[in-house]
Amino acid sequence: MSERYVLAVDQGTTSTRCILFDRRATVVSVVRSEHPQSYPRPGWVEHDAARIWRDVQRLIPRALREAGAGPEQIAAIGIANQRETTVLWDRATGAPVAPAVVWQDTRTGELVERLGRRADAAIVPERSGLPLATYFSATRLRWLLDNDP
């Protein structure tokens, strides 16, 4: 029986890594590609989501080549992502419709403040256990739907 591997895709804030582990959890291959962050306005942090996807598509075969492995030897894939970064994709084309809004971005601050002043604002932490904050993706989704054609 040929060796089987677990492939980990670690898609982080500044880079994407693909790591291949053998059945003993020994690292057999690590490949990495940095990607730039964009700061189009104060408080805004964006990534090119299409570039990140291209990086993943390029890195996985490279990690396999470095290990001398083939895709048929992958038993499982694990993915770690960069927290609450938000991307909207076109359902017909699969292409991102806007830059990824990174978890560090604070463009939704005004919306978060407005929501926090509502009489029913306490329902968010009661139900989720989390405060209203620019960190979370729900207000980013609202912002993208309201501001990007």
Image: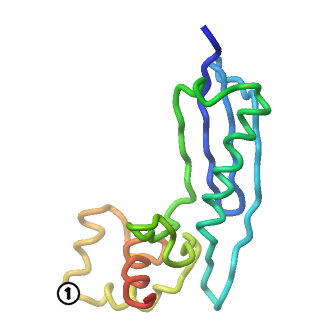
Relative image position of residue 40 (x, y in whole percent): 66, 88
The residue at which mark 1 appears reads as 119
Image color mode:
rainbow
Residue drawn at (64%, 50%) of the image: 57
Residue at the far top in the pictured view? 1
Task: Report the side of 106 relative to 24 (left or right).
Answer: left
Residue at the far left in the pictured view? 120
Q: Is residue 71 above or below residue 96?
A: above
Image quadrant in which the C terminus is located: bottom left
Residue drawn at (60%, 19%) of the image: 4
Residue at the far front in the pictured view? 93
Q: How many marks?
A: 1
Q: Is residue 21 above or below residue 1?
A: below
- Disc 1 marks which amino acid? Ala
Question: Which image quadrant for residue 71?
Answer: top right
**Helix or strand or loop: what does disc 1 sit on?**
loop
Question: Which image quadrant for residue 6?
Answer: top right
Residue drawn at (45%, 71%) of the image: 88
Front position in the image: 123 or 143:
143
Relative image position of residue 30 (x, y in whole percent): 76, 38
Image quadrant in which the N terminus is located: top right
Front position in the image: 76 or 10:
76
* Residue density around tag 1, few if under 14, some if 14–19, many if 20 or more, within 10 Å: few
Residue drawn at (38%, 67%) of the image: 91
Relative image position of residue 5 (x, y in whole percent): 62, 25
